[in-house]
Image (cartoon, rainbow, N blue to C red):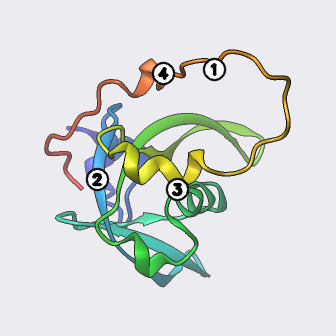
């Protein structure tokens, strides 16, 4: 028996990703009481449990798709487990990244932001990180 199954959670946890990167489409954000605080919870299309948004993940999504959460519906992101520092300890948490299957057209607003002036040189082709080359989109139980 997996001990984590003995303590089911209302919300998505890093263990639920089973060490995989998972592509999801966002459905809605609702404010809910979580551990005595009122926090935003991001729900996904076709999934039962939501992700309690921390400031880091909320800021990343807002940078990709804008600050208005009503406009996030149907937009794709990738969830992945990452080792992070939390309250002085290293723990596994869920982080978000732009889903690599999203077209360049959607990504264009990020690229069109003004950049600091730099000396002119030949353009450098940037490749997406190899870490996100393989995204799992199978049935993760959440």
Q: Which quadrant is the C terminus positioned in?
A: bottom left
N-terminal of the two: label 2 or label 3? 2
Q: Which residue is mark 1?
A: 123
Tell me: residue 76, above or below residue 69. Answer: above
N-terminal of the two: label 1 or label 2? 2
Label 2 vs label 3, nearer the camera = 3
Q: Secondary structure at mark 2?
A: strand
The reply to whether callout 2 and callout 3 are in contact (CB within 8 Å) is: no
Q: Secondary structure at mark 3?
A: helix
Q: Residue at x 40, y 70 (%)?
A: 72
The reply to whether callout 1 and callout 4 are in contact (CB within 8 Å) is: no
Tell me: residue 131, above or below residue 83. Answer: above
**Mark 4: few/some/many CA within 10 Å (<14, 14-19, 20+):** few
Q: Which residue is mark 4?
A: 127
Q: Which residue is mark 2?
A: 24
Q: Residue at x 83, y 40 (%)?
A: 116
Q: Which quadrant is the N terminus positioned in?
A: top left
Residue closer to the observer: 100 or 43: 100
Label 1 vs label 4, nearer the camera = 1
Q: Residue at x 79, y 22 (%)?
A: 120
Q: Quadrant of residue 47?
A: bottom left
**Mark 2: few/some/many CA within 10 Å (<14, 14-19, 20+):** many
The CA distance from mark 4 to mark 3 is: 18 Å
Q: Quadrant of residue 98?
A: top left
- Percent across and percent down for residue 57 are 57, 56
Answer with left or right where residue 1 lies relative to residue 26.
Answer: left
Q: Secondary structure at mark 1?
A: loop
N-terminal of the two: label 4 or label 2? 2
Answer with left or right where residue 113 lies relative to residue 76.
Answer: right
Q: Which residue is mark 3?
A: 64
- Percent across and percent down for residue 94 are 48, 46
């Amino acid at each position: 028996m997996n001990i984590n199954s003995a303590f089911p959670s209302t919300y998505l946890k890093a263990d639920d990703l089973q060490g995989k990167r998972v592509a999801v489409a966002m459905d809605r954000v609702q404010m809910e009481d979580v551990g005595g605080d009122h926090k935003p919870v991001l729900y996904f299309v076709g999934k039962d449990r939501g992700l309690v948004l921390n400031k880091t993940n909320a800021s990343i999504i807002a940078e990709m798709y804008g600050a208005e959460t009503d406009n996030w519906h149907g937009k794709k992101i990738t969830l992945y487990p990452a080792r992070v520092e939390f309250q002085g300890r290293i723990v596994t948490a869920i982080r978000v990244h732009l889903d690599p299957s999203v077209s360049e057209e959607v990504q264009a607003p990020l690229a069109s932001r003004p950049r600091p002036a730099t000396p002119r040189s030949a353009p450098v082709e940037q490749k997406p990180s190899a870490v996100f080359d393989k995204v799992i989109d199978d049935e993760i139980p959440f």
